[in-house]
Image (cartoon, helix red, strand yellow):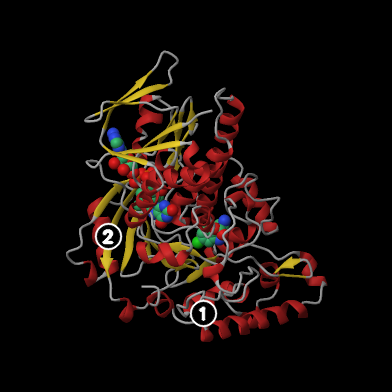
Amino acid sequence: MLTNVVIVGGGTSGWMSASYLKAAFGDRLSVTVLESKRIKTIGVGEATFSTVRHFFDYLGLPEHVWMPKCNATYKLGIRFENWHRKGSYFYHPFERLRVVDGFPLTDWWLHRKPGNSERFDQDVFLMSAICDAERSPRYMDGTLFEQDFKEQTDPKDRKPERSTLTEQDTQFPYAYQFDASLLADYLCAYSTERGVRHIEDDVVEVARDDRGWIGHLRTREHGEVTADLFIDCTGFKGLLLNEALEEPVISFQDTLPNDRAVALRVPVDMEKRGLRPCTTATAQDAGWIWTIPLFGRIGTGYVYASDYTTPEEAERTLREFVGPDAKDVEANHIRMRIGRSRNAWVNNCVAVGLSSGFVEPLESTGIFFIQQGIEQLVKHFPGADWNPQLRDSYNRAIGNTIDGVREFLVMHYRGAGRNDNQYWKDAKTRALPDGLAERLDMWRSKLPTTETIFPNYHGFEPYSYHSMLLGLGGVDLKAPPALALMDDSAAQAEFKLLRAQSQELAKRLPSQYEYLAQMH
Ligand SMILES: Cc1cc2nc3c(=O)[nH]c(=O)nc-3n(C[C@H](O)[C@H](O)[C@H](O)COP(=O)(O)OP(=O)(O)OC[C@H]3O[C@@H](n4cnc5c(N)ncnc54)[C@H](O)[C@@H]3O)c2cc1C
Ligand SMILES: N[C@H](Cc1c[nH]c2cc(Cl)ccc12)C(=O)O
């Protein structure tokens, strides 16, 4: 059996990997994290999927324990502003669609909008009104608001089951937003308390043996470091996988041109400003700005294409967007490597995190990729025979997940109603990943189903495609002809019920600030 793993990198992926492997294998596996104190982590990466709760459950960490330590808040979805047209917005929530007479409410909405509404998301999702009212998804006693996800009465007593992403069968109604550096620190303490060895040093050479595998790492102050398995968490540089083992990177730049970002960490007065329970993605002239409310500050940044604007202009745009609170805050300019390693696992090296692959954070997928990478590594963990079937199956799973998310993001640009400048006009004519043109043709006639979205696991379900296609407004969508032959009174009644339920919840739930303040 393999018993010794060395992780290079102490960012979110390094410490998520270390803590998860320790939780999985206990003392039967020796885990070391080797991280440079000279080379900074990327310093961003704060919004997540709802399924990240499986990661914390696997570590036995209930939210009331880790959230206050990471200035975490709830994320009920993403609010997309100015993507259809300037001044418009809609939500992409963590909420499956109700079905009436065999058709999702989105089909019924295309057939006949209730009261000629223009906000499909308010008519088909409970979450929209809750987000608009900046409510918490939990009542002050911790009870989760009514959803199809049932929890035991007191979440503090809930026994977390150790499930993984691909076993997700219910839709949990929220995700988290947290300070990535505080999370890495928290997981570092969690890991080292459980026996993970932590070396603060630089890898100065990756030595390969005569098979071309990694023989050892040479460090600046701790000599040679050996392992059975090396995990490359060195970020975009891919020190072990891409540089030392020369595994190529497949670029997505031809379909996703945003290759830069500029980020700010802005302290805010939450009591005065409120605490919106969602991430906001605001379309701009050459990309989009993220706003992630944390407890005590916001994380914000402009993701843009260097072919359409400059770092200086992007920073100016971001500071103007944030306003006076951004004064004296230092900007973090980032070059993004958009694409993925051809294989995440080569010989005795597995890349997790940015070194494995990355697409712009429009749907908060970076940490989801890390979680998928680690979960699949445990499921495919190699034996002493290094069975290539395990490695190949792992590489297929990771490649499919990243490719599926890439396609979903390209759809955001192809489907956006905006065409008011060259950046948005080019988004309509740019190359598409294989298969997306055909799928878009299908969706124009029939909204996405499990059979017609990207065929392999990539984290998104049909309702996410519905939410984006109806919200973005740039793709002509049709209701199924069958609905013209059916009585739609049950659907109209469901619209009425949902609207009443969402307004009642928006009234009864506490504000997010009120709920989280009691945790601190
Ligand atoms: C602009 C932007 C916004 C993002 N927003 C989100 C988001 O909202 N949600 C989300 O899920 N993801 C997001 N991401 C992705 C997220 O930031 C990353 O997935 C996450 O931070 C993981 O980064 P990492 O640990 O792989 O790399 P890094 O954070 O870059 O860490 C690399 C580590 O390797 C170490 N290292 C490098 N070279 C050496 C060496 N020679 N010797 C020793 N150590 C070395 C460094 O010291 C560092 O500790 C975003 C990414 C970007 C660029
Ligand atoms: N696996 C899903 C992915 C998902 C569903 N809805 C959203 C909304 C946003 Cl903003 C990001 C991801 C998803 C989950 O996490 O529930």
Q: Is residue 25 above or below residue 144?
A: above
Label 1 secondary element: loop
Kindly give the residue lying farthest to the left in the view shown.
328
Q: Quadrant of ligand 2?
A: bottom right
**Residue count near mark 2 (Cα–Cα under 10 Å), binned few <14, some 14–19, many ≥20:** many
Residue 122 position within the rendered picture, expressed as x and y whole percent measured from the top left: 57, 76
Q: Residue at x 77, y 80 (%)?
A: 489
Instruction: Give the percent coordinates (x, y) of residue 409.
Output: 50, 52
| Mark 2 residue element | strand
Q: Are marks 2 and 1 in contact (CB under 8 Å)?
A: no
**Foreground pick, 291 / 240:** 240
Q: Which residue is mark 1?
A: 139
- For label 2, the residue is 264
Residue drawn at the location 66% of the way across and 70% of the way down: 148
Residue 160 visible, this angle: yes
Q: Amino acid at mark 2?
A: Leu
